[in-house]
């Protein structure tokens, strides 16, 4: 197969952590062509999606004493060409959030790919549909009590009822801008004003789950089915478990409650073309649905001696 990956600049990626690199490595090991591009290299020509793409050769990471070992020169790119993306068997849209206006424009270009010729992972329409915070609201039976508002009085009433809550910007990533709120905090007004940009943008506010101290579990779903999980545990005085803010990772099983959550969301995910997804679960409650470039494969592989990247590519071989 010929596979194109729309990623951030490859020199900025961490091969020992980045899920895109893990999937590209797996594709190369299984004998497929791997090409890379970026959203600013996409074009619409004669009603089709085109891109300037480069072939890439990777030196796979090696697991040594429980750590990924990476060569300094871990990738090599070849000569770029302009090609119609329907020449590819699959296109992975793996640009990191936030979802900006250029990101949305890129999804419109990807809409021009004929799905009968080329599979796009994840679907451009699904990416537009699934704000990673708001999407979870469609599954009220498995999420903590949650509001979305830019109205300070509404947020204050919710906080007074719950006493503790977590405020999340709707466009954030990697735990950025997430705040712990406690009733009676004299900074409450300022925190809400800053987060909502003086009441101009809504934010998500969820009841605080004490189980967050035990970890924020990332569950990887492939075509609606859980294939692995990793626990991200806060360190020091930090209440967030995200790896991007220093959360440590630990091996973890997927519980029956969590499998029920996966079953609850599976049909909707598949209907929206969201094939590769990361669910965030705390204390048996779904808190976020990550669809843009969910991560966690490297950590799951390292802790469990598996290769989720190969599972993704083998699924692709059967479905593209």
Image (spheres, rainbow, N blue to C red):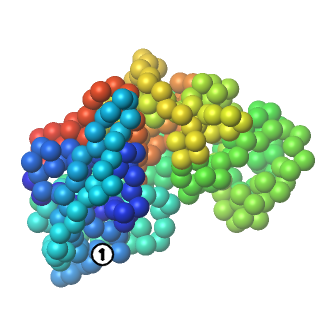
Q: Nearer the viewer, residue 54 or 276?
A: 54
- Left/right placement of residue 91 relative to residue 155 reads left
Does residue 137 appear in this view? no
Q: Give the image location of residue 190, x and y in percent.
A: 83, 57
Q: Is residue 124 above or below residue 23?
A: below
* Residue depicted at x 83% and y 49%: 188
- Left/right placement of residue 211 relative to residue 222 reads right
Q: Is residue 243 above or below residue 42?
A: above
Does residue 184 appear in this view? yes
Badge 1 marks a residue whose secondary structure is helix
- Left/right placement of residue 182 relative to residue 135 reads right
Q: Nearer the viewer, residue 72 or 315?
A: 72
- Left/right placement of residue 310 relative to residue 141 reads left
Q: Give the image location of residue 157, x and y in percent.
A: 81, 42
Q: Neighbour class for label 1 at 10 Å: few (<14), some, many (≥20)?
A: few
Q: Place residue 36 in its image quadrant.
A: bottom left
Looking at the image, which residue sits at the far top? 256
Q: Give the image location of residue 317, x and y in percent.
A: 12, 44
* Residue depicted at x 20% and y 44%: 26
Count how many numbered circles sit on residues in the image: 1
Q: Place residue 35 in its image quadrant.
A: bottom left
* Residue depicted at x 36% and y 29%: 65
* Residue depicted at x 26% and y 58%: 75
Q: Nearer the viewer, residue 163 or 61?
A: 61
Q: Nearer the viewer, residue 152 or 242?
A: 242
Q: Which residue is mark 1?
A: 41
Q: Give the image location of residue 38, x and y in percent.
A: 32, 68
């Amino acid at each position: 197969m010929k596979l194109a990956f729309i990623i951030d600049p490859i020199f900025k990626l961490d091969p020992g952590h980045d899920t895109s690199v893990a999937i590209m490595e797996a594709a190369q090991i299984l004998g497929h062509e791997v090409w890379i591009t970026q959203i600013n290299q996409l074009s619409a020509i004669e009603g089709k999606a085109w891109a300037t793409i480069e072939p890439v050769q990777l030196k796979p990471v090696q697991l040594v004493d429980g750590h990924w070992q990476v060569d300094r020169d871990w990738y090599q790119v070849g000569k770029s060409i302009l090609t119609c993306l329907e020449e590819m068997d699959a296109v992975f849209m793996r640009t990191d959030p936030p979802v900006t206006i250029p990101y949305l424009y890129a999804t419109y270009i990807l809409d021009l790919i004929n799905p009968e010729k080329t599979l796009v992972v994840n679907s451009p329409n699904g990416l537009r549909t699934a704000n990673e915070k708001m999407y979870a609201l469609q599954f009220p039976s498995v999420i903590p009590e949650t509001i979305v508002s830019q109205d300070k009085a509404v947020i204050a009433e919710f906080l007074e009822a719950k006493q503790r809550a977590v405020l999340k910007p709707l466009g954030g990533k990697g735990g950025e801008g997430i705040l712990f709120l406690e009733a009676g905090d004299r900074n409450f007004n300022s925190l809400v004003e800053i987060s909502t940009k003086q009441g101009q943008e809504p934010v998500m506010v969820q009841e605080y789950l004490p189980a967050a101290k035990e970890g924020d579990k990332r569950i990887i779903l492939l075509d609606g089915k859980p294939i692995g999980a990793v626990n991200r545990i806060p360190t020091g005085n930090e209440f967030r478990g995200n790896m991007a803010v220093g959360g440590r990772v630990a091996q973890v099983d997927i519980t029956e409650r969590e499998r029920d959550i996966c079953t609850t969301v599976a049909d909707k995910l598949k209907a929206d073309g969201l094939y590769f997804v990361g669910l965030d679960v705390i204390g048996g409650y779904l808190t976020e649905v990550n669809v843009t470039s969910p991560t966690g494969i490297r950590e799951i592989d390292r802790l469990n001696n598996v290769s989720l990247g190969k599972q993704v590519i083998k699924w692709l071989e059967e479905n593209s």
